[in-house]
Image (tube, coloured by chain):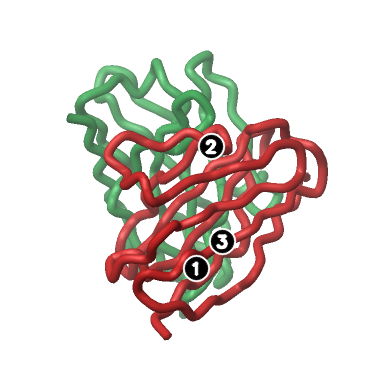
Amino acid sequence: DIQMTQSPSSLSASVGDRVTITCRASQSISNYLNWYQQKPGKAPNLLIYAASSLQSGVPSRFSGSGSGTDFTLTISSLQPEDFAVYYCQQSYGTPYTFGQGTKLEIK
Amino acid sequence: EVQLVESGGGLVQPGGSLRLSCAASGFIVSSNYMNWVRQAPGKGLEWVSVIYSGGGTYYADSVKGRFTISRHNSKNTLFLQMNSLRAEDTAVYYCANLHHGRFDHWGQGTLVTVSS
């Protein structure tokens, strides 16, 4: 199975900050990497697919990069509504594993 | 508009069974790769199972042999039959459509609690 490891597990930041979350796969997954945002009590919401493509309707302050085993999600200028948990997920093959999540909190 | 609505969750004793349903509208279940993903209380997301448009199925090792994914084409509904339930199966269960390699539509989730 492909293991997905996110860092950090939690992060405190302020509105307007630029933040980066990283995700590492245990083997090469090409660009089969997606990012999701989840708010309390809600289903996850797709932000970035295929490592760097912005899902329709997602603000442009979100961006993704990487290929192979190392990936990043960047939020260019944090907004109040961005404080949530973020997950990476690989779709290279089953099981379609998720990272453990990164909780983004207000400083 | 695509909509997925799960139902069937509830409280069940260890060793018991439960069947979850996911009713879809706005797209055809049988033409898509439909999945179940779960989230234990306060924990992360765990992929559970997929049924491909061709009918092939795959399961996480944690549920293999106990859970069965299926679909009813005329009802446009996805199912998850869960047998031999354990306390560690307690979670919110989401159905989600895997479209071109990404989960782009999710249901609201249904809570399964396994406890005596």
Could you say whether the residue bearing mark 1 is in a helix, strand or loop?
A: loop
Give the chain of mark 3: A
Colour-to-chain, green = B
Using a 10 Å C-alpha cutoff, classify the residue at mark 3 as few (fewer than 14 neighbours), some (14 to 19) or many (20 or more).
Answer: some
Please, is residue B98 above or below residue A46 in the view? Answer: above
Q: Nearer the viewer, residue A33 or B104?
A: A33
- Rendered residue at 40%/16% (across/down): B31
Quarter occupied by residue A60: top left
Residue B40 badge: 1
| Residue A97: % across, % down | 64, 48
| Residue A69: % across, % down | 76, 44
| Residue A45: % across, % down | 36, 49
- Callout in the foreground (2, 1): 2
Would you name the residue on which mark 3 appears? A20
Q: For the residue marked with disc 3, what is the amino acid?
A: Thr
| Residue found farthest to the right | A27
- Rendered residue at 28%/66% (across/down): A81
Q: Tell me what hue chain A is rendered in.
A: red
Q: Are marks 2 and 3 on the same chain?
A: yes
